[in-house]
Amino acid sequence: MRTALILLFLLALAAMPGALLPQRTLNANKVADYIAEHGWWGRLLDQLQFYNVYASVWFSAIYILLMISLVGCLLPRTLEYAKALRTKPVLTPRNLSRMPHHSESTVDKSADEVVAQAIKALSGWRKVEREEDNGARTISAERGYLRETGNLVFHFAMLGLIIALAVGKLFGYEGQVIVKADGSQEFCNSGVLGYDSFQPGLRVDGTDLTPFCLKVASFDVNFLPTGQPDLFRANLEYQSEKDLDSGRWERYGLEVNSPLRTDGDRIYLLGHGYAPVFTVTFPNGEKRTMDTQWRPVDQVTFLSEGATKFDPPGITNSEERRTKQIAVTGVFAPTAQLHGSLLNSSFPALNNPMVAVDVMRGDLGIDNGRGQSIFTIDQNQVDNGRLKKVARENLALGGEVKLDDGTVVRFDGVKRWVYLQVSHDPAQVWVLVFAIAIIMGIGASLIIKRRRLWVRVVPAADGRTVVEVGGLARTDQAGYGEEFERLSGAVTGGKN
């Protein structure tokens, strides 16, 4: 038990870096910034796995040792408890007056009557009746065995909780995806490529995910006059695995604290934002319309930034195409507030949408085989001169800007998008069961108290009966004195 307590302390201590330092599974960019800011110290922490605490070798070692220690602690205690359950209550001590609780009475009843009365008073106690060599009759009684049961339940439930959490980490997964809130985009849980970010369990390769599909028909949002949100609700249409063949769609109003549960997966609403709609009319008259999501940089006013990227049509030569790619970058304000030419937002609702854009032309770097954020352009392409700014303008709805080659960029409208998280944990029910068992077990071990009581009945020479009662609380318990007085009074009938 001492070893288990030490390991529990070490586990809590080892978890502290996970709360104090950025973790790669949550924010890889923040980890990179932290390492760059702290130099050699940051690199040392990286080598020691402090940015991935819960998957580190040392955290796993403490975790496994704690499990082994708990098993080693529980097995002998369980065997000892099973043996104690089969053992009769201990013999009545020779000198009951030495017990912490003691009373002695002489009653006008026969020994048989007193013994029968004592057995009735001790209903619910484990008891055994014996006869001593001098003819005295005794009753040994014990109560509170469920205290140890609660203790064992608590520790077995803790072991089960550790195992259930480990199973969840092995076979669970979490993924985040942005879905447009106009019903035009369908997300299906068919593989990791459908997610914007994905965190698999150690035994998950992403090829056997729970199949379901969903789309966001609309998004309801209401803001207080202060700009604080009052209601977020994504109106989903979804198909669980059983509905995929029938083509039937179910409806669900997804809110922040009301996830959708389907076939063991949970879908959470994490956030929302806006996607400005731009139409680019190229010199040959062809048009391209894009509504790429932009990310909020101010969670109060929803001032957002992003980059909407276009490939020129009709150009088959890859070298020529890379000189005429276009990106519309800048900031979007749902309720525009201009300070000179500087655009800001004063409210998160779409009261007066406006964008401040820089139009970039050249090689966006999207054909070089490297991943690129949808929210930004590749700054290296700007630095090396392969991507150049050709226009800057503030545009209201319907506003447009014309480039030097005749290309026209128009701000056509705004769409909403929602940020969803899909979580799968096959052990979540067991985590709940074991958590409840922990509470019940520790509650029983704290409330129930072990106590013993002995009764010795000795016939007196004058025909009366001497009744001696002794009591012992095996754990500190305020109030056993009152219980002892009540029981001794019931045994003797309240007469001396």
Image (spheres, grey):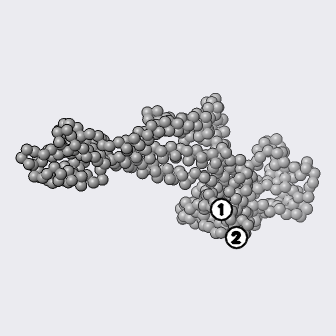
Amino acid carrying mark 1 in the image: Pro
> x and y percent of residue 106 in the render?
11, 47
Q: Residue at x 53, y 44 (%)?
A: 162
Is residue 285 in view from this perspective? yes
Q: Residue at x 43, y 44 (%)?
A: 152
Q: Give the number of the mark in front: 1 or 2.
A: 2
Q: Secondary structure at mark 1?
A: loop
Whichever of labels 1 and 2 marks the residue nearer the N terminus, that label is 2
> x and y percent of residue 141 in the render?
27, 46
Q: Residue at x 54, y 41 (%)?
A: 19
Q: Rounded to the nearest whole Å, what is the CA distance between mark 1 and mark 2? A: 36 Å
Quadrant location of residue 123?
Answer: bottom left
> Which quarter of the figure is the N terminus placed in?
top left
Relative depth, front residue between 411 and 286: 286
Relative depth, front residue between 62 and 132: 132
Q: Secondary structure at mark 2?
A: loop
**Residue sticking out furthest to the right:** 317
Is residue 303 in view from this perspective? no
Q: Residue at x 49, y 36 (%)?
A: 72
Relative depth, front residue between 82 and 37: 82
Q: Which residue is mark 1?
A: 334
Q: Left of 119 or right of it: where is 384? A: right
> How many C-alpha atoms fall within 10 Å of the one at disc 2: few (<14), some, or many (≥20)?
few
Q: Which residue is mark 2?
A: 248
Relative depth, front residue between 237 and 45: 237
> x and y percent of residue 176 in the render?
66, 53
> How many C-alpha atoms fall within 10 Å of the one at disc 1: few (<14), some, or many (≥20)?
many
Q: Is residue 237 above or below residue 299?
A: below
Please report contact status of discs 1 and 2: CB closer than 8 Å, yes or no: no
Q: Is residue 170 above or below residue 69?
A: below
Q: Is residue 125 above or below residue 60?
A: below
Amino acid carrying mark 2 in the image: Arg
